[in-house]
Amino acid sequence: GRLKADVSVEAAGRLQAVSVTDISGLRDRVDDAEVRHAWTGVHGLGWVTWQYFCSLAGIDHFKPDVMLMRFAAEALERYVSPAETDVLLSGAFEELRPSYPELTERALDHTIWLFERGQ
């Protein structure tokens, strides 16, 4: 149990240490392992919080949180990990893109999240 404020300060310092000081810098280096490790190397933060942080920064991808994992698990009638949820939703997104060219991963993520919230 660390305070969120302490975790946030440490994450900000680690991102600054790898020269990510604003959202545009994050967007430019979102796929850089060094930047991702700066975030996930903080005790209390991991891959899912990284995905969520990037989503909040406007980067188009999924954040396989509890709601999305539940959606995938209900569809498959078994446990689905965050990583598998990401793979499954990415595949579903690719299948939907031809019919819905304006669809974004963030929009699909949010739609599923709202659906699960209403369950």
Image (cartoon, rainbow, N blue to C red):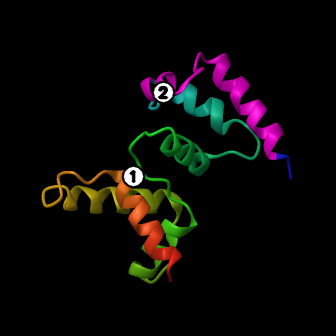
What is the three-letter code of the residue carrying label 1? Arg
* Residue 112, above or below 30: below
Q: Residue at x 38, y 44 (%)?
A: 60
| Residue 32, disc | 2
Compared across the picture, whether 75 is left or right of 98 comes to: right
Whole-percent x, y for residue 85 in the image = 44, 62
In which quadrant of the rendered view does residue 38 lie?
top right
Residue at coordinates 69% horizontally, 35% vertically from top-left? 41
Residue 95 among magenta residues? no
Could you classify mark 2 by the number of other residues whose Cα lies within 10 Å: few (under 14), some (14-19), or many (20 or more)? few
Describe the element under mark 2 as helix, strand or loop.
Answer: loop
Q: Amino acid at mark 2?
A: Asp
Q: Which residues are magenta?
A: 4-28
Q: CA distance from mark 1 to mark 2?
A: 20 Å
The residue at which mark 1 appears reads as 106
Q: Main secondary structure of the magenta part?
A: helix
